[in-house]
Image (cartoon, rainbow, N blue to C red):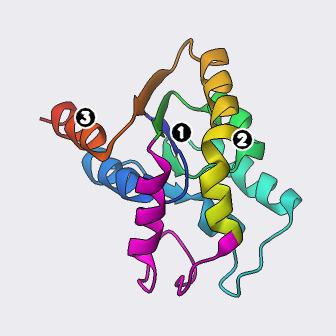
């Protein structure tokens, strides 16, 4: 485990899981949200994002936290380990609500209110995004360790067992 992806819907706890992996492995952790977003809530161009992502993926070791479906196939090709947090929508929405008003190391601003478009995206994730993630995971299964968790308990249990 040297090149790790942590993917799943917003609010699932990808960043918390990625931090736990970082703390246990010592691998450097990169947040795609920090790569894409600016503190003023704008974002860099796709070209600049792709250049920065390519440079990051060329590093020998990393944990990359984030979905960004457009670049998932590129990241899968570079990864040796993938963690998919496939949690129920209500768990993810509760996760988003619980972090409102709190500073986070994975985001360049503090979310202060519900964003209806963001909530709609999370609600649509199982039908609109997840099937493609599973298709790509199957396509690139060979040569990769893939873990799919359906609850926080499963993820926490894996973390405890893997690093005894």
Q: Tell me the CA gap for discs 3 and 2.
A: 28 Å
Q: Which residue is drawn at 30% across and 40% down?
A: 155
Question: Does 104 appear in magenta?
Answer: yes
Depth order, front residue of 79/11 = 11
> Where is residue 3 shown, x and y percent of the image?
50, 36
**Would you call the spot at circle 2 few (<14 residues within 10 Å), some (14-19), or many (20 or more)?**
few
Q: Tell me the CA gap for discs 2 and 1.
A: 32 Å
Give the mark nearest the N terminus, 3 or 2: 2
Q: Is residue 47 left or right of residue 33?
A: right
**Would you call the spot at circle 3 few (<14 residues within 10 Å), some (14-19), or many (20 or more)?**
few
Above or below residue 150? Residue 100 is below
Start-end of magenta stretch: 87-116
Residue of label 3: 158
> Where is residue 59 shown, x and y percent of the image?
58, 44
Q: Which residue is drawn at 63% across and 47% down?
A: 125
Q: Tell me the CA gap for discs 1 and 3.
A: 24 Å
């Amino acid at each position: 485990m040297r090149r790790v992806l942590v993917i799943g819907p917003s609010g699932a706890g990808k960043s918390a899981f990625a931090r736990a992996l970082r703390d246990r492995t010592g691998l450097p952790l990169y947040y795609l949200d920090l790569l894409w977003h600016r503190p003023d809530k704008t974002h860099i161009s796709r070209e600049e994002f792709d250049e920065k992502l390519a440079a990051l993926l060329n590093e020998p070791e990393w944990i990359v936290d984030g979905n960004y479906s457009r670049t998932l196939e590129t990241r899968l090709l570079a990864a040796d380990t993938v963690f998919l947090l496939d949690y129920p929508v209500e768990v993810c929405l509760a996760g988003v609500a619980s972090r409102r008003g709190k500073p986070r190391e994975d985001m360049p601003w503090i979310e202060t209110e519900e964003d209806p478009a963001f909530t709609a995206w999370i609600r649509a994730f199982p039908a609109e995004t997840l099937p493609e993630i599973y298709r790509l995971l199957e396509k690139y299964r060979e040569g990769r360790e893939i873990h799919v968790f359906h609850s926080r308990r499963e993820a926490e249990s894996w973390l405890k067992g893997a690093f005894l």
